[in-house]
Image (spheres, rainbow, N blue to C red):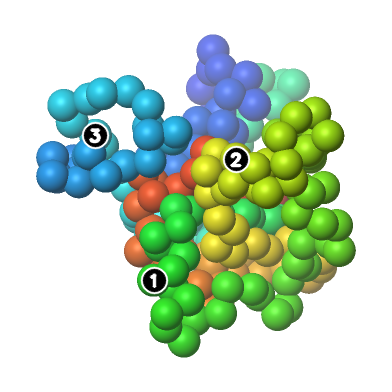
């Protein structure tokens, strides 16, 4: 499809605008606000908005099936629409201890057998890497581990894609598969996640 419309936006602006998920938020019940992790939510608020991860993935559902249409302006001034399909490159979800305990009490495993796991580095090394300090900078190793857990939460799941881009399945298909092992990928709320949680999406 080719259009003759001029655009004041750069191609990158258009791509970001067309591929940024917009999730409908909800208000957290006031009775639950006081139970939020204060290291992650330090501000006193009368209302807190959140969304579920399931709602986030739904934004990628149609894009995974048909691609996200992005207007691209050619050097000639003409504009055409290119379609981009999202692929999950990597994800790490850190949650509160309470959610992890609830998960481990069931049949769900907390490691993905077909993903990369953490390397063989010790918990001590992880504390140094994530927090920028080592246990030698002060306090015992156990104190550092407690600080690490309080600040970052507990690793609920992680996945690192090894396949080449052309060998990957669309993001929604990958998430659906991972959710069979990690049901929290659909039910977790944004307020349950540590700020250390992240994901990388390739298009």
Asked which quadrant contains residue 133, the reply is top right
Residue found farthest to the top: 8
Q: Distance between the residues labelled 1 and 3?
A: 23 Å
Q: Residue at x 42, y 83 (%)?
A: 106
Across and down, in percent, residue 113 comes to 70, 80
| Marked residue nearer the N-terminal end (1 or 3) | 3
Q: Is mark 3 on a helix, strand or loop?
A: loop
Q: Where is residue 25 in the image (x, y as percent from the top left)?
A: 26, 42
Mark pair 1, 2: CA separation: 22 Å
Per the image, the residue denoted by label 1 is 102
Q: Which quarter of the image is occupied by the N terminus? A: top right
Residue under label 2: 147
Q: Name the residue under label 3.
A: 48
Left/right of residue 85 with respect to residue 184 in the rendered view:
right
Residue shown at 78%/38% (left/top)? 135
Between 72 and 122, the one nearer to me in the picture: 122
Q: Where is residue 46 in the image (x, y as percent from the top left)?
A: 16, 26
Residue 33 or residue 93, whichever sits in front: 33
Q: Residue placed at 56% from the left, 32% from the top?
A: 16
Q: Farthest residue in the bottom direction?
A: 107
| Mark 3 burial class by Cα count in 10 Å: few <14, some 14-19, many 20+ | some
Label whose residue precedes the other's in the sequence (1 or 2): 1
Q: Which numbered disc, 1 or 2, marks the residue closer to the eye?
A: 2
Residue 122 as seen in the image, left or right of residue 91: right
Q: Which mark is residue 121?
A: none
Are the two marked residues, 1 and 3, in contact with CB atoms closer than 8 angstroms? no
The CA distance from mark 3 to mark 2 is 26 Å
């Amino acid at each position: 499809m080719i259009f003759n419309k001029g655009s004041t936006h750069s191609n990158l602006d258009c791509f970001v605008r067309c591929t940024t998920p917009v999730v409908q938020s909800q208000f957290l019940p006031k009775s639950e606000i006081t139970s939020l992790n204060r290291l992650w939510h330090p501000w006193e608020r009368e209302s807190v908005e959140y969304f579920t991860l399931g709602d986030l993935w739904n934004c990628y559902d149609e894009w995974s099936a048909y691609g996200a249409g992005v207007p691209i302006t050619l050097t000639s001034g003409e504009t055409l629409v290119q379609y981009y399909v999202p692929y999950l490159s990597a994800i790490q979800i850190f949650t509160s201890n309470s959610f992890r305990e609830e998960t481990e009490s069931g049949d769900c495993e907390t490691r993905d057998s077909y993903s990369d796991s953490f390397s063989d580095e010790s918990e001590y090394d992880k504390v140094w890497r994530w927090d920028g300090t080592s246990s030698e900078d002060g306090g015992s190793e156990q104190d550092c581990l407690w600080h690490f857990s309080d600040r970052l939460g507990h690793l609920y799941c992680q996945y690192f894609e090894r396949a080449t881009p052309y060998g990957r399945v669309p993001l929604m298909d990958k998430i659906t598969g991972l959710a069979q092992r990690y049901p929290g990928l659909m039910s977790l709320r944004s307020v349950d996640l540590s700020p250390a949680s992240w994901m990388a999406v390739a298009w």
